[in-house]
Each structure stands twice: as structure tokens, then as C-alpha cells.
Image: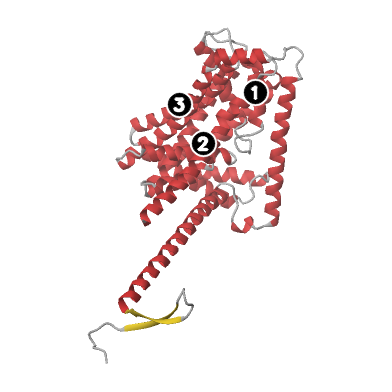
Amino acid sequence: MCNNQDPPIFHKIEIDESTKEPSIVEIDAETIEKQEIDSAKQQLKKEKKLQRAEDRKTDKQAAKQLVMTKILGFNDESAINKRQKFFKTLFTVIFIVFVVGVLAYTFYNDFFGSSEKQLAGWDDIKAIFTKHGFYLAFALISLFICFLAKALKLSVMSKYLTKKWHFKTCMEAAVIGHYYNNVTPLAVGGQPFEIYHLSKHGIHGGVASALPIAAFFLNQLAFVLLSLVSLVLYLRGVVFPGCDPGFLAKALGSYENVIKVMAIVGLSLCFFLPFLVIVFSFLPRFSAWLVKVVMKIGNKLRIVKKPELTTYKTIKNVVHNSRCLKMISKNPLVFITEFVLSLMENIALSTIAYFTLKLFGFDLPSDGFHEWLQVVQLCIILYISISFVPTPGNSGAADLSFYLLFSTGITAAGLAFPAMITWRVLAFYSFIIIGFIFTKINRKSERKAHLREEA
């Protein structure tokens, strides 16, 4: 008999590797307990790994669904709807054909469509890049200023609201925001992902949702103001001293009247949201009534399908923007700083086109500052004229409209198309490339952080 104080002894049957004969082996309770603990640890580790993978999948799906639902108007039911898939595929095909067609037209027109301009040779191209290559660095600096201005906007607001600097997180949010803004129609897909990133990295609660909304509103307001000033000066024929009075009309050419009409329409549409937010801050009842009237008119014109639901969503968006605006406007210094940074972000984006032109030999009889001022004014007019085109990055319309600028400013044939492509890469595709690389690196770093936590 065994003593009750002694640990129990268990036996198990094992196969001897040398003799291949079964043998009985004694094991105590401590060994069994240790094996069970090790097995439980391994199981827990597997469960954590599976849970992390599931969380990442859920986060990705949630962010995607947020954009699909709030921005693009899709939902879970429509995602599996065959008709919705059909129209989505049709829109993609039309979009690709349209963009490729515009690129083919501009390519042919630049290389083969002009008999007045002499086609640039390899020596001409080499000489241009040798002489003006440093302008590419200035264009890249302008691109960096676009990211920096947005990061500073978010950082200043976070400092004001949370009493802490979050520059690194805000710079990451700026990169993510620019990335998703440029891959979604009408450049409105970045805010949900910015909110998600800020809330995940130390900025919680209403602050995380207020920062991107306020930054977007101020950027829209600055863009509208720049567009209004540029368009009014152009329509009234006001030219700054030292500027070429015929540059804008020459650049727009036979498309001048079309660009004017498109710019007025684009300015009206872009002005609607800032106007509503400002009016709602002082006259909420009048603003709500105005939204209802506009939605009813839209419904009669068969532009708005569900006027009541659209009215509710619009008023909700306006209320949120108004609260964010009031939150920042309590401190005039913060508000002015944010608005100046928004102006700087928009001007830096237009400056990329100017330095791209200079890279390919653009030159006006005016001095450098006035030359830059005229190009920036024309860029802003072109941006507002294509702002309502419902393609990612206003693709197609942007390529065609800015080709007018490059074909006017560059005298040698065969250089306007490469200049337009260079500008498009710097001012559009670079945001996508940088954002895509960052999101991939960020996901890998998060996985490594999870592994370190487990270790």
C-alpha cells in the first residue's frame, strides 16, 4: 500500500525505439501537471495568434466597411447584390477606358499633333535636365510640405485639446489620410482611417474624431477661398503688376469658356459645405431649413433619391463640423494657425506643378515670384474646375486640364506629355505610393510588436 502523503504514481506504455517492444514507464503527478501546463501554454499561444489574426481582419473589414458605407454608399447587402457588382464593374471599366483615352490623346497631340513645334531630341532633353534638374528637388520639397502642413494641423489641434504633442502619430495619420483621399472618389475617404489611426495610437474619445473632421473642413475652406480669389481676379481681368496679362487666356486657349463654367460650378459645390457649417454655427434653424429645401429640389430633379435620409445625414455632418469648428475657434491663435497651414498645404500642392514646369524649361518674361504666382493661380482654377469629377484623384479630367498648362508653358514638342506625367506622379501617385508603403510597414511593425508582447 502506498502512503497517502506520497504523490500518486501513474504508468504509461511507450514503444522502445531500439527493440520496438512495448514497455511500461512510471510517471509521477508532477510530470503530468507540467506537461498539462506546457500543453495549455501552447494552446493559449495558438489561440492568441488566431485572435490577433482575426482582430486584424476585423479591423481591416471594419475600416473598409466604414468607407464603403459612409463614403461610397455601399452596405453589406449591396456588396453581395449582383446589380451593385455589375455597376461597380461597369464604372471601373469606363474609368479605365476614359483615363487611357485621355492619356492616348495627350500623347498623340504632344508628339504628332503639332506641326508648329519642333520635336525635342535626346540632346535637348539631356540639356534641360542637366540645367534644371534641381527643380525636381524643389518639387519633392513641395510634396513634403503637403504632408508636413497636414501633420502640423493635426498636431497643433491635438496639443490644444489634449495638452500633449502627438507629431509622430499625426504625421502617420496625414500619410494615411492622403493615401485614402487619393484612392477614393471626391477625395473624402481618408477621414475614417485617420480617426481609426489616431484613436489606436493614444488619442481617444471625441478628440480623435474631431481632429480629421476639423482639418478637412479648414482645408476645404482654404481651398474655396483661394479658388474664389483666383477666379474672381481672372474673370475681372485683374493682373498683378509684373505678371504676363495674357498667360491665363493663352494657357486655356479654346477651352477658356468651358473651364470658366466648370470652375464656377465646382466653386459653388465646394462652397456649399463650408457655407452650411458657418451658417449653422449662428443660425441652426435656417441652415436645417435650407438643407431640406435643397434636398426637396434635388428630389424633384431626380438627383436625390431619398430626401429625408439624405437631409438627416447632411444635417448630422454639418452639426459635427460645426462642433469641431466651435471647439477650435475658441482659441483665435489656434484657429488662425490652422487656417494658415491649410492655405500652405493647398499652395504647396499647386507649387509642384510650377517646379515641374521649370524642370522642363518653362520660362515667362516676368520675374520668378510673379511667374510662380501666375502658375499657382492657374493651377487653383484648374483644380476647382475638376473638383466635382467623381473619379479617384479626378483622374482623366486632371490629366487633360493640366495638359493645357504644360502644353502652353513648354515650347518644345514632345515635352508637355512627359511633364504632365511627371507632375501627375508627384502630385497624385506619390501620395498613393508613399501611403501604400507606409501602411504595409505599419502592419508589419504592429505584428512584430504583438510578438514581442507575447514573448
Q: Which of 216 and 263 is in front in this view?
A: 216
Q: Residue 2, relative to residue 114: is it above or below?
A: below
- Of mark 1 and mark 2, the one earlier in the sequence is 1
User: Is label 2 in contact with label 3 (beta carbons under 8 Å)?
Assistant: no
Kindly identify which numbered label has been placed on residue 344.
Answer: 3
Q: What residue sits right under mark 2 in the picture?
A: 434
Residue at image coords 47%, 28%: 144
Residue 264 at least partly seen? yes
Q: In terms of sequence position, does the residue under pointer 1 or pointer 3 come before the other?
A: 3
Q: What element carries label 1?
A: helix
- As measured in the structure, the alpha-carbon distance from the residue carrying label 1 to the one carrying label 2 is 21 Å
The residue mark sitting in front, 1 or 3, is 1
Q: Residues within 10 Å of mark 1 (few under 14, many from 20)?
A: some
Q: Crowding near pointer 2: few (<14 within 10 Å), some, many (20+)?
A: some
- Alpha carbon separation for disc pair 2 and 3: 20 Å
Residue 107 pos. (x, y %): 71, 25
Q: Quadrant of the C terminus?
A: bottom left
Q: What residue type is labelled 2?
A: Ile
Closer-to-camera residue (320/49):
49
Q: Is residue 260 visible?
A: no
Q: What residue is rendered at 57% in x and 23% in y?
A: 379
Q: Point out the tag, 2 or 3, that comes first from the N-terminus.
A: 3
Q: Name the residue under label 1.
A: 418
Q: Residue at x 37, y 57 (%)?
A: 454
